[in-house]
Image: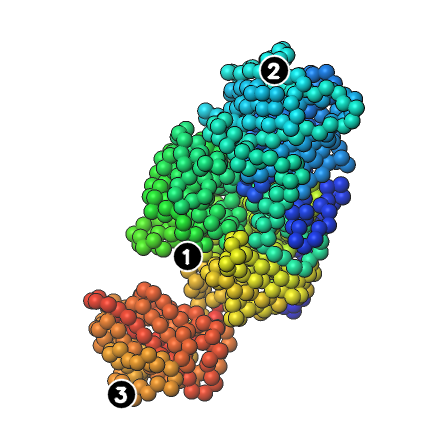
Amino acid sequence: MRRTSLERSLRRLSVVLASSGFAACLMVNAACAAPAAPASDLSALVNPFVGTDRSGDTFPGAVAPFGMMQLSPNLENNGYYWSNTHMHGFVVNLMSGDGGDNEGQVLMTATTGPVHVERADTDFQFDHQHESATAGYYQVMMQPWGVNAEMTTTTRCGMLKYTFPAGKQANILLPLSYANNPTLSADVHYIDSQTITGHVTSQAFYGEHQGIPVYFVMKFSKPFDTHGVWTNGKITPNAGEAAQNDRKMVIGFYGSYSSSAKPQDVEVRIGMSYVDVNGAIANLQAETPNGDFAHYKSLASQAWNKELALIDVEGGTLTHRRIFYTALYHALISPTIFDDVDGRYTGFDGKIHTVPAGHKHFYATFSGWDIYRSQVPLLGIIEPERSGDMAQSIVEMAKQLGYIDRWPQLNQPCAVMNGDPLTICLANFWNADVRNFDMETAYQFMWKQSQFGDPHAHIDVYQGFDEEKKGTTINSSASVSSAQEYNVAYAALGHLAEKLNKPEDANFLLGRAAQYRQMYNPSSGYFQGKNSNGVWDATFGGYTEGNRDIYLWFTPHDVQGMVDLMGGTQTFDKRLDNFFDKNLYDPTNEPDIQAPFLYDYINRPWKTQHIVAQTADRCFTDAPGGLANGGNDDLGTMSSWYLLSQLGFYPVDPGVPYFEVCTPRFTRTILHFGSSPSAKQFVINAPAAASENEYIQSAVLNGVPLTKPWFDEAAILSGGNWTVDVASTPNPQWAASPFDRPYSLSSGFNHLPQNPILKSLIATGKEEAVIWRYTETKPTDEWFKSSFDDTSWKTGPAGFGTEDEGVTPRTPWISDDIWMRRTFTLPSWSHTLAIIAYHDQDLDVYLNGVLATHIDGWTHSYDPLPIAPSALAALKPTQNTIAVHVHHPGDGRHFADVGLADLGWPDSEK
């Protein structure tokens, strides 16, 4: 019956996924497919067109890993859409998958024949049959001009190669006043017949800011035959200066070449800077001093191959590897390097700063609300040095602004979205053992922000949560989801405070992190806002890019708390099934991307394995619309979700150093922690990995059986290997114990049923006067082993300690330590064997010489505790030994009593 029930559930989930909008992602367009490539040329596996259709909002142009310059085709808004057939030209900066108007500055294009400068006369037509791209390279045929354009980039510079047809005048034009946001000012300067400089300042992504200036220098491989400028459509031949000083003006520059009997190539080397023209010139001299287009195209390929090799995969189909390395490519574009080659950058205060000592770069554009969920946890592992620079860049931003903006674009605070996502990013970097940044200063700003919020938020949703009235007030369009986001940030900062030995801060923050419970309406079964009178919002408003069904699953820091709010495991399971069955899950956006992994928290890991595999396979393809079922990539967030789903682990709660498990999808994967030859690596082996083998049968992590659906990030960072046996049918016995559930704020690791059913097997002193051997003098190091001779120890009945409310000891104990031993024959049990302990304070329990549990702190009742699998394996049907150590320094209540019980779970919590 159980297997039949499992199979029915799987078939139902498969039908739902296949019949929904997921099926649309299966389309493949051969015109944009990346060519086959040798294993060493990973860059050729990348298809930059993925994500350019539907709402992916990626760009297909050339960019280096984390490069300052994104040399790419451009139309309004985000630059490029697969369905378009015309284009304005090429620009030096774009964001990848942000879903809004952005940048697109320093527009360049080319025409043939007489010079015309109106936009309708300079736009070009194109088709996908005459267009191609790989990592670091883009090419298109510009019609009707018949001009072939190719482009490639270094970190701060680019090269654009035009091939003009024979017999026509060739023109290169710079319509500088056009960008994806309003242009506030611009200028151009003719230096000589092969050099021009200038700048373009455009408004930022969101908000009312002073604008973002981009400075440029261009060096042309051939001197112009003629040149000129234009202002508001009026051409001035032979002029070399033009300036725009208000939004209504339109300026530009052109350089022309006489017609030639043969096609003629013109290569343009472009340097950019966000500091000044001198910075652009220095960048150009350092990165593209000489050499032809083919040389720099090769360098771009080499740069990408080095970065992409941080994750080596074996197995899978060629298409599977294309999808994987395209996702990795998108995950390694942002945040972007913002400093010039001399280390200078323009800060958030408008002043020129230098990259701090001990760091290579200042990074910019952190899509905070998105990237904390997946991209930052990935970068913390494979890019530790860059991660340190990114973390320090956030700290420098805070020092310049006075606070941590949640979504900074370049050097402008945008305050878009909600929560304190960069707090979570910094905590996650720390969890990944990234230490090369100023945590002391970072913590000061994070703590301050946790008390007062972002003082410059455009969307003032911080006050959406009213602590006094224990709920949310309906004073913004995002009050509910904002409060939930802040709870996640409080938890991340609280756990960080624990690591930094700030217990008072930790207690305060972790208490705040539980406030989400006050927004759960048990009558409706959803998170809801309240009006100023404390009345639930019947309209169910207040969610950012989601609804009540999506945000029901957004308590990543306390999934067990959510299970309890819903009334137990069975209810949680049914509602989560319903979420997927009724196609309420939105795999195109961030708020519920953790939802498939929540089955790991209720001992249904096989459901997580199935839904994650199905979602990844159906929503990510190598077609233009094949990124997250057409959703925004959000600067690498959704691509990183896919990557982690293929590796076999994902951080449901990025504020703690643990990963929840799904099925590895390649036969062998090697994660390199940086590109240094001495960098550690983590190897994932899944020899039977295949599209049909979705289910984990068993696993071994660093030589030890893994029986839980999660593991500590330290298991990866220390280097080692994870071997996973997979098959086409689920194994509901793997990770089946409720004690195996991942960490939650409410329960920690020691998850227990709310109403446990306990049957005593080895009695405690509460039940009878059980005799133990004990000592208060430190014994030898062998004291916990079965073979240890304890005949010289005292004997006495449990429990041991001092009298306290609710408990009376049978044997006094007031010293700092007590060691206890006894032997027993273990009866059979039906459910889960658990330790039952009342202890004050720290507790260690050994079974037959193997550590069964360690608990720091104390209890006020007899609580069940999980037993380590290795200790369970050490038990024998005949005589066993239990050894206990309780440590309590100083005065106060002392107590020590331990037994064993058969722990059953109520049906509602199974």
Quarter of the image where the N terminus is located: bottom right
Instruction: Provide the secondary structure element on which disc 2 rests.
Output: strand
> What residue is pinned by disc 3?
792
Pointer 1: residues within 10 angstroms few (<14), some, or many (20+)? some
Q: Position of residue 774 (x, y in %)?
A: 28, 81
Kind of residue sitting beneath label 1 = Ser
Question: On the rendered structure, is 135 left or right of 199?
Answer: right
Foreground pick, 36 / 429: 36
Considering only order in the chain, which callout, 1 or 2, is on the residue closer to the N terminus? 2
Considering only order in the chain, which callout, 2 or 3, is on the residue closer to the N terminus? 2
- The residue that appears at 35% across and 41% down in the rendered structure is 445
Tag of residue 559: none
* Mark toward the viewer: 3 or 1: 3
Considering only order in the chain, which callout, 1 or 3, is on the residue closer to the N terminus? 1
- Residue 648 seen from this side: no
> What residue is pinned by disc 1?
746
Instruction: Provide the secondary structure element on which disc 3 rests.
Output: loop
- Residue 184 seen from this side: yes
Alpha-carbon span between mark 3 and mark 1: 43 Å
Kind of residue sitting beneath label 2 = Val
> What residue is pinned by disc 2?
229
Above or below, comparing residue 128 to residue 201 in the picture: below
Foreground pick, 53 / 309: 309
- The residue that appears at 35% across and 38% down in the rendered structure is 452
Pointer 3: residues within 10 angstroms few (<14), some, or many (20+)? few
Pointer 2: residues within 10 angstroms few (<14), some, or many (20+)? many
**Mark 2 and mark 3 in contact (Cβ < 8 Å)?**
no
**Mark 1 and mark 2 in contact (Cβ < 8 Å)?**
no
- The residue that appears at 47% across and 40% down in the rendered structure is 363
**Mark 1 and mark 3 in contact (Cβ < 8 Å)?**
no
